[in-house]
Amino acid sequence: MNFSEYRSMDGIALAAALSKGELLPKDAMRLAQDAAEVVDRVCNAITYRRYAAAMVDAEKCTPGGERFDGVPFLLKDSGLASTDLQSSTGSRLLKNTSFARDATLTERFRKAGFISFARTAVPEFCMAPTTEALCNGGPTRNPFDLTRSSGGSSGGAAVAVAAGVVPIAHGSDGGGSIRVPAASCGIFGLKPSRGLVPMGPFRGEGWGGLACDGVLSRSVRDTARVMDLVGGMEPGAPYASPSFRGGFEDAVRNGSVPPLRIGLWTDPWGLDVDAPCLAAAEATAEACRSLGHYVVRLQPPVFDYPAFIAAIITIMSVNIAASVDKKLAGSGRMVTEDDLEPAILDGYNLGRSTLGGSYVQAINLLHATGRMMVEMMSECDIIISPTLTSLPVKLGTISTEVRSFKEFRENAGKLTAFLAIINASGQPAASLPMWRHEGLPVGVQLIGHFGRDDIVLALSGQLEKSRLWKDAAQFPRLAEMERTSRGA
């Protein structure tokens, strides 16, 4: 099997080929590793590697069943604990962090049959909607336009999936970090309901409940099967999503979505939205009408978005301070400019000076945001919105080189106005590749009620069959990428 044949298959098709003996796990791993090196040379997407060990794992693998046995996989360099792979979380300060045991999710990925062979690049502390960490030696470039961002913080993962290195990759989302890169790179990315995917045993929550883990993929059914395999209540966890008994993959496979009442939301409290992003959402709404769904325009409730961004800044800065102080505890030294990028260093200082009462107020504002979203969705089953307010941004547009964490995160908040509120509410939301503008991917977001990931996935599966999706979902050309990169 050549690379073109390999990357034409989604994860379920690849797992079936491995199970039938049409492809050996070691050959799939070799194809994935070779592709990873090409993509990394062009886009700078891969960090820690365990190529030889992963090849040994592949040679020992005996595929079979309804899992992903032998399918090559990538873990995000987000600090998800793995005894197989070190992590930096995109920071020079945390470089080469090792782990004594696996996170629960890492164990579940392994039990699902995936073989992890590397990590994917992230911005420092996963704090940006673009992946440009100094720790990685430069930006992670968008495979469709090397002058633009791949998104963040799961930028490296999105590049790898979009380019066909792997059909599925781990991602995480604390303010849009699965959906931003999915939209930027023209693939599918689901932020699951809070509590569906485990965060233990080292953490009960991330960023005050904003963050969750998931995957990026090229097919809806791949993500659905992954959620079936890795999702579910973790004993001792502080959050739990309502259980869905039917099976997410079955919900996608059946394709029988009853007529839904869908709200079309295109005005994020007065912020500007680029015309192609609006056009993508409008076209997707029309596609839903053609499928028999009822679409109405939504006017969101009154909401103080700048105050919400200020709460996000408080929560993120306190988390930076906690992470840095934990790393430096007992070392006898202070953090320096050589440890952290300028905006993140300012975020550290801001976090250390934040009073407990301010943090509590920020958490309470998140909870109020969840209640606002319940009101907004009171008369609909799903919301359609643009994923981003603009096309994939030019590299350097949202930069940690600014010396103000507040300014840095306010810039990020303009791009992600449709996204971070869904982290606050804990709802499921997915970015779908539904549009192209001058060769660039444009994503459309579906937002569901809390715990109804099945409806988000099922409607995504319906739209996956549409001409819009088929025209928008394309592979970048690796050979062309490599030639272009020499002049980038």
Image (cartoon, grey):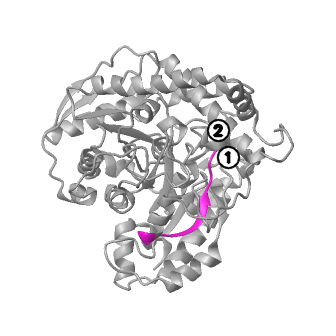
> Badge 2 is on which residue?
395
Q: Which residues are magenta?
A: 111-123
| Residue 238 belongs to magenta span | no
Residue 385 in the image, given as x and y percentages of width and height: 35, 32
**Real-space Cα separation, disc 2 to disc 1, in angstroms:** 8 Å
Residue 2 in the image, given as x and y percentages of width and height: 48, 77
Neighbour class for label 1 at 10 Å: few (<14), some, many (≥20)?
many
Instruction: Please name the residue shown 86% across and 44% down the image.
Output: 332
Neighbour class for label 2 at 10 Å: few (<14), some, many (≥20)?
many
Residue reaching furthest to the right: 332
Instruction: Please name the residue shown 35% across and 41% down the image.
Output: 428
Earlier in the chain: of badge 2 and badge 1, it is 1
Q: Amino acid at mark 2?
A: Leu
Residue 426 in the image, given as x and y percentages of width and height: 39, 37
Q: Quadrant of the N terminus?
A: bottom left
Please, is residue 45 above or below residue 306 in the view?
below
Q: Is residue 359 left or right of residue 447?
A: right
The answer to whether mark 2 and mark 1 are in CB contact below 8 A is yes
Instruction: Please name the residue shown 56% across and 38% down the image.
Output: 129
Instruction: Please name the residue shown 57% across and 44% down the image.
Output: 153
Q: Is residue 108 left or right of residue 375?
A: right
> Badge 1 is on which residue?
139
**Which element type, helix, strand or loop, lies under badge 2?**
loop
- Confirm whether residue 349 shows in the render: yes
Nearer to us in this view, 310 or 152:
310
Residue 37 in the image, given as x and y percentages of width and height: 64, 66
Please, is residue 109 above or below residue 154 in the view?
below
Q: Quadrant of residue 167?
A: bottom left
| Residue 121 belongs to magenta span | yes
**Which element type, helix, strand or loop, lies under badge 1?**
loop
Nearer to us in this view, 25 or 483:
25
